[in-house]
Image (tube, rainbow, N blue to C red):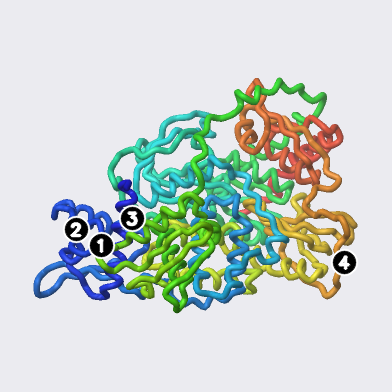
């Protein structure tokens, strides 16, 4: 057997022995009675036992120790109430909603397998309907799109997750998009953070001797351990991943100053909702924000299309006015002729080969499999399970099922406290409950990785889950956190609870009941909130935003609305009949715009799907449903983005940019 397999049997056997004895045990007791330790020398045993104990604790298995006051020996215990999941008040409806979470994310979520295992543990011992074979109806009403997701990305997340949990230093080549340079980085990784639709790894950059943030999709090589040690560093006690979230695009990097911006009265509530926090403050119609990049802050102001006026510093006022003038000039006269496209083979970045998603620890899989096998026996001594049931529920490859069963059969076999004997016979698994089988029939406590998978899933689609469970997200989360165990999840950000949760709940009910909804909505191109009456059809999570796809009753047209721009949603008594053949997710009457991006900004657009040109610029074709949105977006690039066609849209950009250059001068000085 391999070194890893030997270690697994040792660790599972140690747990089985401590649980079976139910009394404090000495190291001598453990060496004599636990499978894998008996043949070791005292020195080898001390080394292996210390390592196994530390690893079990990191996996959420709470091994306790205390010193015997008479002999001075260290005594070890494992109390069953701390090993098993506590009794939960999570009802079947809430569990089914969490199962919907898995259906929504599977195939687009790197943590899908640990999430599957966590849900399996939560459902063990419940009725067959608790972990439904089909998702709740929410899965048919919502689509999750993650633009940053790729097989390479989930492979990198898997490697970084392993390095974080083992506290190992890693090396990789990284492309700094701001410097447009690639170099080797050596990092002590502290945490992974999903933010604004992208994944970031945060840690101590050893060359720069500073805490740095790296976007995972910009890693340009295989991620490898820097040393062969079992542990390279310890997480600093003052590190808190929450300090790194919630930053606006202009706040990445060292703070360069503080800006004051006048916002339209009907816009202030949205600015407070979107950017409220330690780095930003809204007082009446004055938005005060720290910035690292005045250029990116100027871009945000221009994107607001006149609803934000820079007051100070003077550099910010200059950048916005000059940016509007540059956009006007770029869209007057004859459009430029773009260079040729770079050949596809040359444009492809060098990426590591597919390395698989984040995988649950084998220890956690075997713990859960053991409990499931024993539960199948019920009160009887024997049980039979279809092999495909284990393969599907635990995501075990068919050719590896027999190996998993054999490992469990070996757990402390020599020590005499074995729990199960399971054998694959054709398409069935026959289970015999052994001496201590009843001890392990309950589901084990979630490992940190499984708990983290649930937290991250709630971050992605939590409001939909709360809506389907008819329970606030913070209550669902609080119930789950009772199961997380005696380990710290500080390096995993808590799910964000924003205004979207209540809106998702109302819109979900309206979609299910075919009820008309009245929206108070802030359009990107207007300074005042408008009222819209709509028939809601479906909700989409297009990271990082939530959208509802509707039929606008007054306009008699399909329209999609971003939830973060809704001030209020009211479900009316009036019902509607769903329109036959209407696909709310499609862009209806969309215009295709060709947009050129200068070499100064092209690399950011290539990340989003634009095609690189031989002169370093980029070209993109966008299907545009809202001309007003695109005009604001193009103007925000301060002349570095140019609409080539259609001509009508190009002329509208020039006109609006001319108007903005005049409007963006502060109307009055404000303190």
Instruction: Give the labeled residue for mark 2.
Output: 38
* 10 Å crowding of disc 4: few (<14), some (14-19), many (20+): few
Real-space Cα distance between discs 1 and 4? 68 Å
Real-space Cα distance between discs 3 and 2? 16 Å
Confirm whether residue 470 shows in the render.
yes
Instruction: Give the labeled residue for mark 4.
Output: 577
Above or below — where is 260 with respect to 506?
Answer: above
Confirm whether residue 272 shows in the render.
no
| Quadrant where the C terminus is found in the figure | bottom right
Q: Earlier in the sequence, mark 2 or mark 1?
A: 2
* 10 Å crowding of disc 3: few (<14), some (14-19), many (20+): many
Real-space Cα distance between discs 2 and 4? 73 Å
Estimate the x, y position of residue 543 in percent, counting from the top left: 63, 51
Q: Earlier in the sequence, mark 4 or mark 3?
A: 3
Instruction: Give the labeled residue for mark 3.
Output: 8
Estimate the x, y position of residue 166 in percent, counting from the top left: 35, 50
Instruction: Give 633 or 291, whichever is nearer the viewer.
Output: 633
Secondary structure of the residue carrying numbered label 3? helix
Q: Residue at x 83, y 43 (%)?
A: 590
Estimate the x, y position of residue 456 in percent, counting from the top left: 53, 57
Secondary structure of the residue carrying numbered label 4? loop
Q: Earlier in the sequence, mark 2 or mark 4?
A: 2
Above or below — where is 260 with respect to 125?
Answer: above
> Can you tell which mark lies on residue 330?
none
């Amino acid at each position: 057997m391999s070194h890893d397999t030997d270690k697994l049997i040792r660790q599972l056997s140690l747990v089985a022995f401590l649980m079976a004895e139910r009394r404090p045990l000495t190291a001598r007791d453990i060496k004599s009675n636990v499978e894998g330790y008996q043949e070791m020398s005292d020195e080898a045993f001390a080394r292996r036992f210390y390592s196994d104990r530390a690893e079990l604790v990191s996996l959420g298995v709470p091994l306790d120790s205390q010193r015997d006051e008479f002999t001075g020996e260290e005594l070890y215990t494992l109390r069953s109430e701390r090993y098993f999941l506590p009794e939960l008040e999570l009802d079947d409806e809430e569990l089914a909603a969490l199962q919907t979470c898995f259906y929504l994310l599977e195939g687009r979520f790197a943590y899908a397998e640990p999430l599957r295992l966590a849900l399996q543990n939560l459902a063990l011992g419940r009725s067959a309907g608790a972990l439904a074979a089909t998702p709740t109806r929410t899965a048919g009403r919502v689509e999750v799109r993650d633009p940053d997701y790729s097989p390479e990305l989930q492979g990198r997340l898997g490697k970084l997750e392993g390095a974080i949990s083992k506290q190992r230093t890693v090396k990789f080549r990284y492309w700094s998009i701001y410097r447009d340079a690639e170099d080797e980085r050596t990092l002590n990784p502290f945490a992974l953070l999903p933010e604004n639709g992208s994944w970031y790894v945060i840690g101590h950059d050893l060359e720069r001797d500073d805490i740095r943030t790296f976007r995972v999709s910009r890693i340009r090589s295989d991620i490898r351990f820097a040393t062969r040690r079992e542990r390279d560093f310890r997480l600093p006690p003052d590190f808190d991943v929450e300090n790194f979230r919630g930053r606006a695009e202009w706040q990445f990097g060292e703070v360069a100053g503080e800006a004051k911006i006048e916002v339209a009265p009907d816009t202030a509530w949205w600015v407070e909702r979107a950017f409220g926090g330690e780095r930003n403050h809204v007082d009446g119609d004055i938005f005060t924000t720290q910035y690292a990049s005045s250029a990116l802050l100027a871009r945000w102001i221009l994107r607001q299309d006149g609803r934000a006026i820079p007051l100070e510093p003077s550099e910010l006022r200059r950048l916005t006015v000059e940016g509007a003038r540059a956009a006007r000039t770029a869209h007057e006269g004859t459009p430029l002729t773009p260079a040729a496209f770079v050949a596809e083979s040359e444009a492809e970045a060098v990426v590591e080969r597919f390395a698989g998603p984040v995988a649950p620890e084998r220890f956690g899989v075997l713990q859960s499999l053991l409990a499931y096998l024993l539960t199948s026996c019920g009160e009887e001594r024997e049980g039979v399970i279809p092999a495909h049931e284990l393969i599907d529920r635990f995501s075990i490859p068919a050719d590896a099922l027999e190996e998993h069963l054999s490992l469990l059969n070996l757990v402390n076999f020599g020590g005499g406290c074995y729990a199960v004997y399971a054998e694959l016979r054709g398409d069935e698994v026959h289970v015999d409950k052994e001496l201590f089988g009843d001890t392990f029939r309950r589901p084990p406590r979630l490992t940190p990785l499984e708990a983290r998978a649930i937290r991250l899933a709630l971050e992605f689609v939590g409001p939909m889950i709360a809506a389907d469970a008819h329970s606030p997200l913070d209550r669902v989360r609080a119930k789950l956190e009772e199961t997380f165990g005696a380990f710290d999840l500080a390096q995993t950000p808590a799910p964000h609870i924003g205004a979207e949760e209540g809106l998702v709940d109302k819109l979900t009910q309206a979609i299910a009941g075919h009820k008309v909804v009245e929206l108070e909505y802030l359009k990107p191109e207007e300074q005042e909130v408008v009222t819209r009456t709509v028939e809601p059809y479906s909700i989409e999570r297009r990271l990082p935003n939530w959208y509802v796809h509707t039929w606008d009753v007054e306009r008699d047209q399909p329209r999609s609305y971003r939830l973060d721009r809704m001030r209020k949603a009211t479900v009316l008594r009036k019902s509607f009949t769903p329109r036959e053949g209407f696909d709310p997710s499609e862009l209806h009457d969309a215009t295709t715009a060709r947009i050129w991006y200068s070499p100064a900004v092209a690399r950011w657009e290539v990340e989003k799907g634009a095609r690189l040109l031989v002169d370093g610029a980029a070209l993109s074709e966008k299907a545009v449903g809202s001309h007003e949105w695109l005009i604001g977006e193009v103007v925000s690039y301060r002349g570095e983005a140019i609409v080539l066609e259609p001509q009508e849209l190009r002329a509208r950009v020039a006109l609006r940019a001319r108007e903005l250059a005049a409007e963006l001068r502060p109307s009055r000085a404000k303190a």
